[in-house]
Image (cartoon, helix red, strand yellow):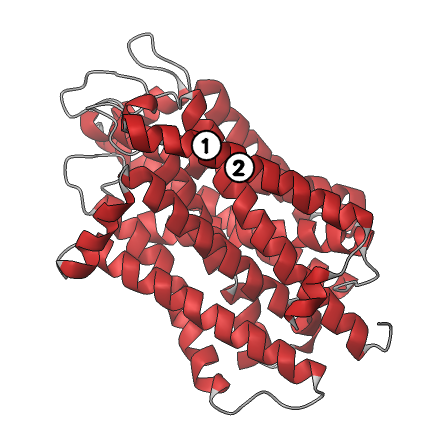
Amino acid sequence: MLEKALKGSKTYWMWLLALAVVIAVGFVVYLRQLEFGLGITGMSRDVTWGFYIAQFTFLVGVAASAVMLVLPYYLHDYKTFGKITVLGEFLAVASVLMCMLFIIVDLGQPMRLLNVIFYPTPNSMLFWDMIVLNGYLFLNIVIGWNVLDAERNNTAPEKWIKPLIYLSIPWAVSIHTVTAFLYCGLPGRGFWLTAVLAPRFLASAFAAGPAFLILLSFIIRRFTNFDAGTRARQTLAKIVAYAVLANLFFFLCEVFVAVYSQIPEHMSHLQYLFFGLHGHDALVPWMWSSMALMVLAVIFLIIPAARQNETTLIFSCAFVFVGTWIDKGLGMISGGFVPNPLHEVNEYIPSIPEIVITIGVYALGFLVLTLLYKVVTGVKREVAGQG
């Protein structure tokens, strides 16, 4: 089936070339980071996890969201998701790949990754994160590829695939839960020290991932004749609406606990993010924008007429994706490190090299996603007798 990724229109090849150029620029800057060290990033003694780990956290959620398709389709035989489930599984593959790359660039020296393998420490959340991420990548590649191959040959998938499908459901939940435990296991950081961090992560994941998949389905329909189906998009949109509501509810719970209890270690992080602290307010406009985007999206997605309008649906999904990205890709990490345990404010702003490397990793992820989606749409066309 891979040969289908080697055939395409001029637009397809121009898109791949553009991604390759961005990847090359990002790689050159990464070589500079390898030579100079993490000193070229905006990280410091107080903020030891920055933009890279923030993107890793966000993309783990996008990967985990595949369960919102796998569970109804395979477990409850919800046929409406028949055309879009493989797209969700391959989105998970590209997302997990980007997650791993963000961990590698954050380590500074990639050889340090071998320490996790040669000197495993089961009491470390990072050790378990390595296991769940690699396992989830393997599961989605094997399941997605075999199901697609069976569809191409007009046969049922192999029987041994079914246990892997069932295993992938709790595994999807585990990857974002373990990621949340990386943070809420640190007692010195009041912003992360909450039992609802894992549920909040999952809620935002089940909003951002399906929202992005809806946007991707529109893009695919625009450039190919493959349509995932209006009903599938509408069902996903309802899932997005409830997931965003749950995410906002968990956030308000955290605000209540921090403000009502008046614990400075918990209040100061929220104060910094939404009102500024000691004259430092770099993230204030971003965080209010994030909340406004998510609230607007919920309003649009709950009203049936607005949700069924494709233009409004596209904007709503974009609002959800950008809003949750700001929340996790900017505020979650910085908000946990600033202020530090001594209540001193040392703000973190990503450096230009850091941003360029990040864009390069995203470009690599989109390259993999494009190739995988080209195979999927090629097989769908072949099955439909169009190619």
The residue wearing badge 2 is 24
Amino acid identity at mark 2: Ala
Q: Is residue 95 left or right of residue 19?
A: left
The residue wearing badge 1 is 28
**Helix or strand or loop: what does disc 2 sit on?**
helix
User: Which residue is at the front of the view, 341 or 288?
Assistant: 341
| Residue 97 versus residue 149 in the image, above or below | above
**Helix or strand or loop: what does disc 1 sit on?**
helix
Residue 263 appears anywhere in the view: no
Mark 1–mark 2 CB contact (< 8 Å): yes
User: Which residue is at the front of the view, 124 or 7?
Assistant: 7
Amino acid identity at mark 1: Val
| Residue 47 versus residue 238 in the image, above or below | above
Q: Quote the CA–CA distance across marks 1 and 2.
A: 6 Å
Q: Position of residue 361 (x, y in %)?
A: 48, 42
Q: Position of residue 8 (x, y in %)?
A: 78, 57
Question: What residue lies at 15% left-to-right and 60% top-to-bottom?
Answer: 118
If the image is split into quadrants, where does the C terminus sit? bottom right
Q: Position of residue 261 (x, y in %)?
A: 22, 32
Q: Which dot marks residue 208? A: none
Residue 189 appears anywhere in the view: yes
User: Which residue is at the front of the view, 122 or 14?
Assistant: 14
- Classify 10 Å Cα crowding around label 1: few (below 14), some (14-19), many (20 and above): some
Q: Position of residue 117 (x, y in %)?
A: 20, 60
Q: Is residue 71 left or right of residue 194?
A: right
| Residue 264 versus residue 27 in the image, above or below | above
Which quarter of the picture shows residue 251?
top left
Which quarter of the picture shows residue 282?
top left
